[in-house]
Amino acid sequence: MSIPTTDGALLTQAVLRQLRDEIFAGKLSPGTSLSVPGLASRLEVSRSPVREAVQQLVVDGLAVYTPRAGAKVADFDEDMLRHVFEVREVLDGLAARQATALVTLAELEDLWARVREQETLLDAAPDHRRDADLDLDFHTEVRTASANKPLCDALLRLDTQTHLYRSDMWSHDVNRRLAVAEHRRIVAALEAGDADEAERAAKAHASGVLVRLLRK
């Protein structure tokens, strides 16, 4: 496999996207060594962009670094998932509360469009990657409306980490329907200007998603 040759930062970003995709797809499983020389050889690029990409994976929480042992793909178990969602519940609630006073009519219209798209897809066959991406896009827009960049950055890192947890949550119709109904509740609260309800709805959604992710 090779990555088309580009310059500098563009090449690093291309390598980073490739490694992230392989981690999320399970091709690079938890505990797999992220050897810079080995990856550079396989991707047919120089070591520098690979080294920078691996460093970013560590920053994002997708990899861990141990002195003398190097970096490896992070192992994300149930305990870690619970810890992440404990934080996400609080932060998503805060983001929804702050977004209530700042969300624009155009943003509300777009959020409703996202909810309607998800509702339409409930009658289609499940698609884990599609449904997970739509869910992330929805939450990213709510968080962006809060205009709180540190908060958005922290939540993006948490979302990135949860991709490491293998779950068939999105393959079950009831889970998909619950998620969309919860999204609808969040947008309705934002539209009504009810900050308390927006926070409650966002926190309840995060709490429910955790339960459904862990459900066997």
Image: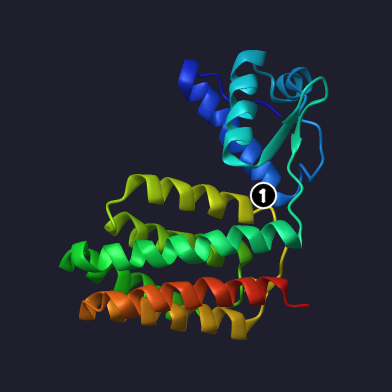
The quarter of the image holding the N terminus is: top right
Residue 129 x %, y %: 59, 60
Residue 17 x %, y %: 57, 37
Asked if residue 151 lies left or right of residue 84, the reply is left
Residue 209 x %, y %: 58, 73
Q: How is the protein colored in the picture?
A: rainbow
Which residue is rendered at x = 79% and y = 45% of the image? 29
Of residues 139 and 177, the one nearer the viewer is 139
Q: Is residue 55 above or below residue 195?
A: above
Asked if one can make out residue 152 in the rendered structure from this viewpoint, the answer is: yes
Of residues 58 and 87, the one nearer the viewer is 87
Q: Amino acid at mark 1?
A: Phe
Badge 1 density bin: few <14, some 14–19, many ≥20, Cα 10 Å = some
Asked if residue 53 lies left or right of residue 88, the reply is right
Q: Is residue 105 above or below residue 73?
A: below
Asked if one can make out residue 134 in the rendered structure from this viewpoint, the answer is: no
Residue 2 x %, y %: 66, 26
Residue picked out by circle 1: 24
Q: Secondary structure at mark 1?
A: helix
Q: Is residue 157 above or below residue 136?
A: above
Which residue is rendered at x = 25% and y = 69% of the image? 100
Which residue is rendered at x = 20% and y = 66% of the image? 101
